[in-house]
Image: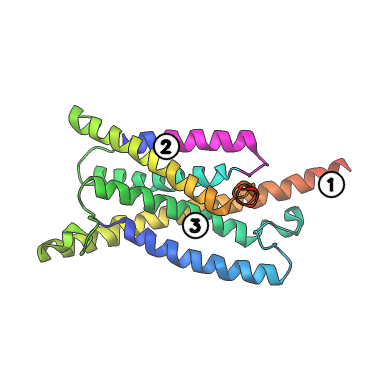
Amino acid sequence: MTLVITLLAAAIATAFWYAKAPNSDMRLGTLALMYWGAALMWCVDGIHGLLEGEGFIEIADAAAMLDDAILGLVVVAVGLVAWVVYLVAKDPKRVLRKSLANS
Amino acid sequence: MACFLVSGGEAIVVTAVHKAVKKSEIERGIVDESGKQLTDPTQEGICWTRKLSWLMNMLWGGVILLAIEHMWHGEVVPFPPFLTAMYNPADIPAMLGEMATVGVAMAALVTVTWFAVTLVADAVVKRQSATAAEKA
């Protein structure tokens, strides 16, 4: 479920990036690439699980599925926080610098 | 256990390479200080500063989010030795084995995907240029 939720986040971030392109002021491409990178890594984890005789995604146990789903939401939230930190640090629209200069 | 550390190592190396490439491309007038390409990508191709930033974002994003997953499962703790597998010497070979297989495969898949994306992006940009030349 973590993989599914991260893939969904990657697809949504990519759609927003596409809608805003070529304007990259919000660095939505960075957010999308972060989620795609994590999703690819979890795909490898899933394939490893298959080779070990487990499922690609945990669907047999409802409690484990719920735990994975909550983890997926936490991962998406952490990704958003990391992106906001990156955005403020890079300040591509110079909003922070202008605000600080005017205060 | 600690598979994401392999991608973390690659992310550190790629970040250092990106910094060196950006410095070189600034000196050659290919990009400006903010990393924006100054040359025509339809003629020169997409600059490496930009291409490497894609790989950096994928690797760092994956490492941060997988670190959260490992913390969630209690495999990473915020105090030394940071990896719970290190508490038991019997778990260390299994951890290293997982890094050598799953960890390397994760880093390789991200890198191969990124490389394929760079080839497609360059082809798309050059095709756009050829189409524009045909219309003119």
Disc 3: CA contacts within 10 A as few (<14), some (14-19) or many (>=20): many
Residue, x 56% and y 50% (percent of image)? B117
Instruction: State left or right for residue A64 relative to residue B43.
Output: left
Secondary structure beneath label 2: helix
On screen, A56 above or below A63? below
| Segment tinted magenta in the rendering | A7-25
Magenta region includes residue A20: yes
- Residue that label 3 marks: B56
Residue, x 67% and y 56% (percent of image)? B46
User: In which chain is the residue bearing label 3?
Assistant: B
User: In which chain is the residue bearing label 1?
Assistant: B
Residue A42 picture location, percent across and down: 34, 45
Could you tell me the amino acid type at mark 2? Leu
Residue, x 55% and y 59% (percent of image)? B52
The label number, if any, that marks residue A7 in the structure image: 2
Q: Which numbered disc, 1 or 3, marks the residue that appears first in the sequence?
A: 3
Q: Nearer the viewer, mark 1 or mark 3?
A: 3
Residue B121 picture location, percent across and down: 63, 49
